[in-house]
Amino acid sequence: MTPKAVKYFEARPYPPGEHGRGRKQNSDYKVRLLEKQRLRAQYDISERQMARAYDRAKKAEGKTGEALVVELERRLDALVLRSGIARTIYQARQMVVHGHIEVNGAKVDKPSFRVRPDDVITVRERSREKVPFQVAREGGYAGEGETPRYLQVNLKALAFRLDRDPNRKEIPVICDEQLVVEYYAR
């Protein structure tokens, strides 16, 4: 390199040309927005559902961020995923919408249904012979993550029970919930 080029690189620590300079630093708003979008994507919910969950969490006791994640975790589609009956949140949501899931013996086809402690969730009798449920019965989806302690799961019977409300530490969601709260508090 020529001395002139060395001097240039010392003055500007990025490559030359129109594609050289890196991105600008993210704004505080962007950081909070991306964190909120990450949480939304993990539960596959709309912005309106997320805002309503935040409003309910705001009224709950304790930290709003932890209450928000617990609120989202109590959704029926999320619990079907955590129990090992479904492989992804999308598959869990489809199972619920297509009417394959019962809560306390009654068919529920709303993925946003909020499960309460001691509710028993089962796969409907006529759906048990379908391929995804046979795979789940054999434990095909359960190996991808440890079953949380707040659930009692019986994969052979394709049933599980929510023993208690989950703690934030037990919920396998990658999120800084404080940033989500700050996003909605603006």
Image (cartoon, helix red, strand yellow):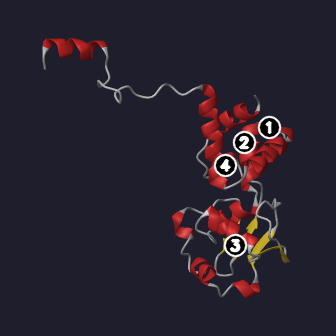
Tell me whether circle 1 and circle 3 mark residues in contact (CB < 8 Å). no
Q: Is residue 83 visible?
A: no
Q: Is residue 182 left or right of residue 173?
A: right
Distance CA(mark 3)–CA(mark 2) = 27 Å
Tell me whether circle 1 and circle 4 mark residues in contact (CB < 8 Å). no
Element type at mark 4? helix
Element type at mark 3? helix
Residue positioned 76% across, 57% down in the render: 74
Which residue occupies the foreground of this view, 89 or 178? Answer: 89
- Identified by mark 3, the residue type is Met
Please tell me whether residue 104 is drawn above or below residue 23 in the rendered image: below
Q: Earlier in the sequence, mark 4 or mark 3?
A: 4
| Label 1 sits on residue | 62
Please provide percent x and percent y for residue 7. 22, 11
Q: Is residue 168 left or right of residue 10?
A: right
- Identified by mark 1, the residue type is Gly
Please tell me whether residue 39 is drawn above or below residue 89 in the rendered image: above
Residue positioned 35% across, 30% down in the render: 19
Tell which tag, 4 or 2, sits nearer the viewer. Answer: 4
Q: Earlier in the sequence, mark 4 or mark 2?
A: 4
Residue positioned 81% across, 43% down in the render: 57
- Tell me which corner region of the image, top left, top right, bottom left or bottom right, holds residue 179: top right
Distance CA(mark 4)–CA(mark 2) = 15 Å
Q: Which mark is residue 40?
A: 4
Q: Quadrant of the N terminus?
A: top left
Number of other residues with Cα within 10 Å of mark 2, as a class: few under 14, some 14 to 19, many 20 or more = some
| Label 2 sits on residue | 66
| Label 3 sits on residue | 95
Tell me whether circle 1 and circle 2 mark residues in contact (CB < 8 Å). yes
